[in-house]
Image (spheres, helix red, strand yellow):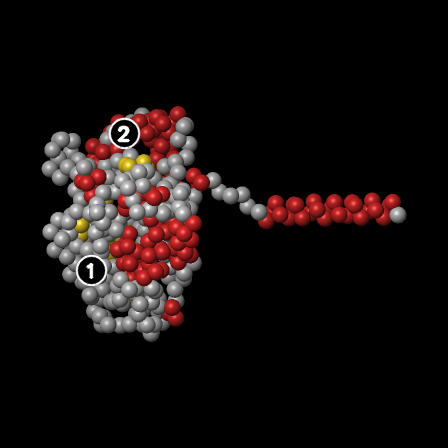
Amino acid sequence: MKNIININYITGLILIILLMTACDMINTSVPADDGILDGPVEGLTREQGAQFLAGDIAFNNDIFNAATGLGPFFVATSCGSCHAGDGKGHPFTTLTRFGQTNETGNQYIGNGGPQLQNRSIPGYTPEQIPHGTTFSKFTPPANTGLGFLAALTDDQILANADPDDADGDGISGVPNYNTPPDYFKPQWFHKSLDGRYIGRFGKKAAAIDLLIQTVNAYNEDMGITSDFRMDEPSIFNGSVEMPDDVADPEIPAATVRNVVFYLRTLKAPVQRNQNSPEVQAGRQVFMNISCGKCHTPEFTTPKSDIAALSNKTFYPYTDLLMHDMGPELDDNYTEGTAKTYEWRTPPLWGLGLSPKSQGGQYFLMHDGRAKSIEEAILWHSGEAAGSRDKYKALSPAEKSNILKFLESL
């Protein structure tokens, strides 16, 4: 009997060990907060947390097909396919814009513009760029921290503008004013200039708020109609009315609003290794060579309708303004009141995590042309030429430190 008990005990012990080992093999460690871009801001209520989750599901899990309204012309089948892990897009997901060379407007609106739909559902032919028309490539940006940028007042943005270079530093910075769609409802912090409002989102700052950005992404990227925008995407030289077989709107307003809430309440990227002497030294060099004049390090939000976004100091490294980036970055395409050579200062937070969503390497600048952070710096010209030249003159140790700082963001 004793031997039987011992055998049973040993057998049970072996089973427990095997189960524990199996669990260890199955369980994966939770990624560090500074190693991912996804996740909500702290301080959401229970109801807000539920809406964040609903928006997360719509953004990442809703994959459209012909039966659910995709197209008939499109670029992507879901929001998340262009923003893996809420990070930057890849050359395979880069968007193509065409048809506008000055601020008078896009000549192809209603006839394929402003965005190329290079894919289509069965029975339709994908769009092609009109012959001889100039175009620009836009790599999808990272999504995190957008709610903090959306919460800033127009006055906070305009405080950094210097259209006439009054201080003589060679850096101007101007807002991009855009005509809003009918469904846009200005908030208390928006200021109108002849019916136009300051854009904040997109490579050319064409989207005034995240609702406009989201509605246009559904429509122009996926061919999905909503209560806010019921028109099916058209293609150049095709019929304006070329609907699919799914009744409009193809998604309800509630879904759009959930996605907007999700984008507003994604956490800000968390800096890594910020106490490293090299990173701290690199930040100082970054400021010394005037990079911070456009990549403004710090803002504080005013009171927001979302308490978790109210009165928060954050570090995006952008001024949300348009800057002359020189002839090499002039794509002869624009949006709003921006010139063809002007680009919005992109936020640098989350920069070091970009390879996680870009196939293991960097694709930086507006079109992904730069394959490293240093290459992106060297592409700077126009108003940024002075800072670029100062970077070139740095010692190898100083260059290493500034790159480590940028990788930490």
Residue occupying the point 23% across, 43% down: 153
Q: Is mark 2 in CB contact (under 8 Å) with mark 1?
A: no
In the rendered image, which residue does mark 1 sit on? 182
**Residue 287, numbered label:** 2
User: Left of 309 or right of it: where is 177?
Assistant: left
Q: Position of residue 400 (x, y in %)?
A: 36, 30
**Residue 84, numbered label:** none
Task: State the residue in front, 285 or 78.
Answer: 78
Please tell me whether mark 2 sits on a helix, a strand or a loop.
Answer: helix
**Kind of residue sitting beneath label 1:** Asp
Mark 2 or 1 closer to N-term?
1
Decide: few, some or many residues near mark 2? Use Cα within 10 Å; few <14, some 14-19, many ≥20. some
Residue occupying the point 39% across, 38% down: 270
From this view, report whether residue 120 is shown above or below residue 49: below
**Kind of residue sitting beneath label 2:** Met
Q: Position of residue 221 (x, y in %)?
A: 31, 60
Whether residue 203 is visible here, answered yes or no, is: no
Decide: few, some or many residues near mark 1? Use Cα within 10 Å; few <14, some 14-19, many ≥20. few
Q: Nearer the viewer, mark 2 or mark 1?
A: 1
Q: Position of residue 183 (x, y in %)?
A: 23, 59
Residue occupying the point 38% across, 59% down: 78
